[in-house]
Image (cartoon, helix red, strand yellow):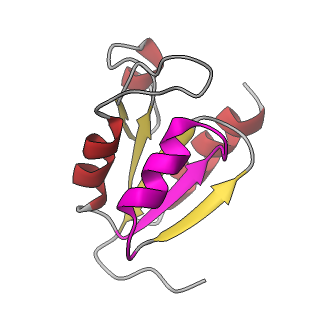
Amino acid sequence: MGGPTEFLKLICESHARRGIQVKILTLDAPGEAWLRNAPVLAAGGGPGHGVYGYHRRFKERLFREMNCFDLMVVHGLWQYHGVSALTVARSAFIVNLPAGPVVFITSSAHRLPSL
């Protein structure tokens, strides 16, 4: 593996070692094998359709997940999940990274520092 997938794996593992709760939400179908083998809790919120990965229920799923976490990091600026994240994250940080279709959300018992 390489690129965005490897970055996601490494940063999730690093957070988990520090006791920070991490969850990955993707536009993949819920039954994808990699979701079961991910280094942290992972869920498929798709499958996304078309070039931009549209799924009609992804935004409501993202909204439900966001209520449980302090921070959301969005990978991929040009797909449907980026637009969804922008609309649901009214008070949380969003950091947009330029590659990869994966969203992950982190939380901890103690508040994360402002960046």
Residue positioned 22% across, 51% down in the render: 64
x then y, percent, for residue 54: 46, 27
Q: Is residue 25 above or below residue 112?
A: above
Q: Is residue 4 above or below residue 115?
A: above
x then y, percent, for residue 86: 48, 59
x then y, percent, for residue 49: 48, 17
**Residue range of the region highlighted in magenta in the rendering:** 70-91
Residue positioned 32% across, 20% down in the render: 30
x then y, percent, for residue 28: 45, 22
**Left or right position of 6 against 9:** right
Q: Is residue 9 visible?
A: yes
- In the picture, residue 112 is in which quadrant? bottom left
**Left or right position of 61 against 3:** left
- In the picture, residue 46 is in which quadrant? top left
Residue at the outermost bottom position: 114
Q: Is residue 65 above or below residue 33?
A: below
| Along the line of sight, the residue nearer the viewer: 92 or 79 | 79
Residue positioned 65% across, 43% down in the render: 76
Please check the rendered image and state whether residue 84 is part of the magenta-colored stretch, yes or no: yes
**Left or right position of 99 against 63:** right
Residue positioned 61% across, 83% down in the render: 115
